[in-house]
Amino acid sequence: MPPQRFALPSEVPGLAARRIAADILDGVLHKRRTLDEQLDGTAAHPGLKSLSDRDRALMRRLVATILRRLGTLGHVLSRLLDRGIPTDAPRAQSALLIGAAQILWMDVPDHAAVDLSVRLVQSDRRAAKYAGLVNAVLRRCAREGQPLIDEVKSRNLDVAPWLLARWSAHYGATTASAIAHAIGQEPSFDITVKSDPSQWATRLHGETLPTGSVRTVLQGSVTMLPGFSEGQWWVQDAAAALPARLFGDVANKNIVDLCAAPGGKTAQLAHGGARVTAVDRSPARMARLRDNLARLSLDAACAVSEGSEWLAQNRGDGFDGILIDAPCTSTGTIRRHPDIGWLRQESDIAPLAATQRRLLQGAVAALKIGGMLVYCTCSLEPEEGEQAIADLLKSETALQRVPIEASEVAGLSEIITADGDLRTLPSHLAHPDPRLAGLDGFYATRLVRRN
């Protein structure tokens, strides 16, 4: 049931953005709805249409900051509240989180952060009685909050405990802590360009990464940036741009891109001259892929279907290449999608791993002799990467791993495993400016069918 609100004689500047931020936070934390579904598409928050570009950007940053710092925020507020965060009024909880996040991490005057959070609870019938509490706690937060943050900096409170335990077991405690630190930073904006990355780095006030992607910290609407409407580039994390390149020269090759939407890898393959068939089970996501290809003036055949079913129906003489960007827990993308760290559960891994096995087995059957399979996931969990491929190679003796050389990934040897696979971590690609550091966590391997 939506929160009941008092009618206000006129909207206070910035209050609408914070009200929508509170609604979206409630969607993530209490209704387990993803940010993507609340921000885009048919199920998006209806109030977004009325926000200015500036307020929309503020709202997104508010929500992202809170989700990135949720554990630390919980610690700070618990120390400032005698009886804990009110549980009978979600809007009071959201107002405290929104106010504290602005005071502690955002360039918002403390008095404005406090005032707008108080107005936020005053406009909700269930939360209005907590207006005095919100005011007092946030004023204390402005005075006492930073020392409370400092006392828990080493505890990695902003990562779900089950994730931190898994990363520590697999990567070691030091690397796990580095990952936790990296995903707490606001990420840069990465693009893949059709040509001349150095020129686009200059135009977009960014820099060219060793891998060829362009990275910038520009803010604002993507569609208004130079080159977007002309179809000169597309948004794609630098790590996500690597798997498609593992095919090498794709000119005139028949390649299937499974689970293809929103289409960054499809665009790479099509731009390289491949005859691409993009397959995705979601009609809405496939519509977005088609729109992206049209903007980029690139061609690909498109099919709305579940990947393994489509492969079973379209084996023919086999494909030259199959790219599987498999559905996964997406824990490698938490720095860009901070809701994932709080929505995912460890029990999600097994059913997703089963889906990945079906896709892999279907791809092996559809691959021609001499054909190449590139498998990738944006997960940090070994069951969805290294272990999945180890199991596949045991059962499919016709497959052979083709090790990835550091020279293929701009000499970044740290992202190549001992087996010759790709493994990027959010803590990779260090930079003096933390805004320009980091990668999404990806696993990728390259296999060839020999007989």
Image (spheres, rainbow, N blue to C red):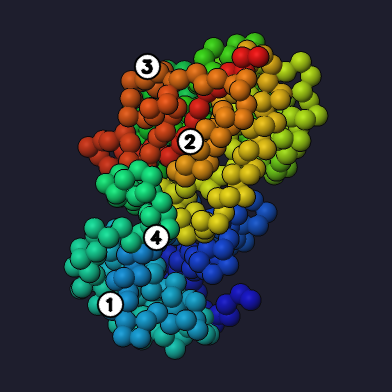
Q: Which mark is residue 161?
A: 4
Q: Which mark is residue 407?
A: 3
Query: Mark 1 vs mark 3: which is more N-terminal?
Result: 1
Q: Which mark is residue 79?
A: 1
Q: Give the CA separation, mark 2 to mark 1.
A: 42 Å
Query: Mark 2 vs mark 4: which is more N-terminal?
Result: 4
The secondary element bearing badge 2 is classed as helix
Residue at 58% x, 67% y is 31
Which residue is nearer to you in this view: 280 or 208?
280
Residue 283 lies, in percent from the top left, at 73, 42
Q: Give the CA separation, mark 3 to mark 2.
A: 21 Å
Query: Mark 3 vs mark 2: which is more N-terminal?
Result: 2
Q: Which mark is residue 386?
A: 2
Amino acid type at image mark 2: Glu
Amino acid type at image mark 3: Ser
For label 1, the crowd category at 10 Å Cα-Cα, with few meaning under 14, some 14 to 19 and many 20 or more, is some
Quadrant housing the N terminus: bottom right
Which residue is nearer to you in this view: 141 or 376?
376
Q: Give the CA separation, mark 1 to mark 4.
A: 20 Å
